[in-house]
Image (spheres, helix red, strand yellow):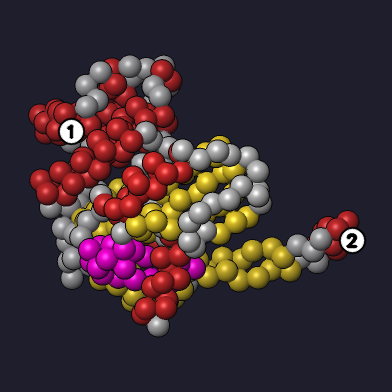
Amino acid sequence: MNGIHIANLYKYYKSEKRKEGLRGAIRSLYKREYKEVRAIDGVSLDISSGEMVGLIGPNGAGKTTLMKLLSGVLYAEKGQIEIDGFVPFRRKKEFLRNITLFTGQRSFLSIAIWDLPPVDGYELLRHIYGIERDTFKERLSFFVELLKAEELIHKPLRKLSLGERTKVELIASMIHFPSYVFLDEPTIGLDVLSQKIMWDFFKTYNIETGATLIISSHYIRDLEELGKRVLILNKGKIIYDGEKEKLKSWIGDKKYVKIELTNPDTPIPFKGAIREDSTVSLEIEKKDIQNFIDKITGMDGIIDIEVTDPPLEKIIRDIFEKEG
């Protein structure tokens, strides 16, 4: 079977239960108690070859665990998981040559010396994967052009910024042109321009190669850049699986505004405002944001104004209410 097939998948962890205080610390030295944590709790889904899927969820939802299960880094306690007929945790060579798992914390170029430029590390990876030189040059040119990394690959790795290093590391993780690309928070820590370049690269790679991409994020703003299909993972369960346009319609056209005041008693003449000490928060229709900003900036006692998308936790609560 082509594509990704997951049925009734579970992954457990043991977490130590610690009691507070000195007595509890001493007791744990002699008798330790553990509780079971279900990082993945009965997940079932199918992803067709060539899909670009967004995986959204708050921190601790199980996104990274699911990515590691898909790439074979972890094995499941129960359930079935297959990718093109391969069972990931068996880590067969044919399977490993067709996948990559990229995270912001993992360094593909750590095998190279930091004083050497990334291009030297790519050459080593070419030998590891057995890529012909002409094919290697063609692929490297493709990646460098899309990621605007022509100069970066010739600089020593230690002289690159976080965003620059993310780009060259991404090239290293994909130099073998994988058919399945698992990206765990790939744009975290990057500025807006670098994020845009990365998202454009993912879209182009998906279209040009027909590869399957699963991209995780805990930022709801990334929803605009994800594929047509979005999964929301919460506490190890898939609570939404569908088109992002439908999800966006549920989110609506509201923005969340947080206002910091010099004095907690400063009057705020807006309906629905919620006060907490010197902070006021409220929902505003997107079309009314400019008028709201114009009014609020003319008031005394305002220190700061922050406009954000709806919190992911609220969207999850809304989904539970609407989907039952």
Residue ID for mark 2: 23
278 to the left or right of 313: right
Q: Is residue 233 magenta?
A: yes
The numbered disc on residue 286 is none
What residue do we see at 38% from left, 73% from top?
319
Residue type at mark 1? Leu
What residue do we see at 43% from left, 54% from top?
256
Q: Residue furthest bottom?
A: 324
Residue type at mark 2? Arg
Total count of labels? 2
From this view, report whether residue 121 is shown above or below residue 40: above
Instruction: Please state the horizontal and vertical placement of residue 23, each as a whole percent of the image.
Output: 89, 61
Image quadrant where one finds the N terminus: bottom left
Distance between the alpha carbons at the discs numbered 2 and 1: 59 Å
Image quadrant where one finds the C terminus: bottom left
Instruction: Please state the horizontal and vertical placement of residue 209, each as a whole percent of the image.
Output: 12, 48
Instruction: Please state the horizontal and vertical placement of residue 63, each as a whole percent of the image.
Output: 42, 59
The numbered disc on residue 146 is 1
What residue do we see at 69% from left, 68% from top?
34
The magenta span reads 229-252
Q: Is residue 184 magenta?
A: no
Of residues 312 and 170, the one drawn nearer to the viewer in this rendering: 312
Of residues 281 and 234, the one drawn nearer to the viewer in this rendering: 281
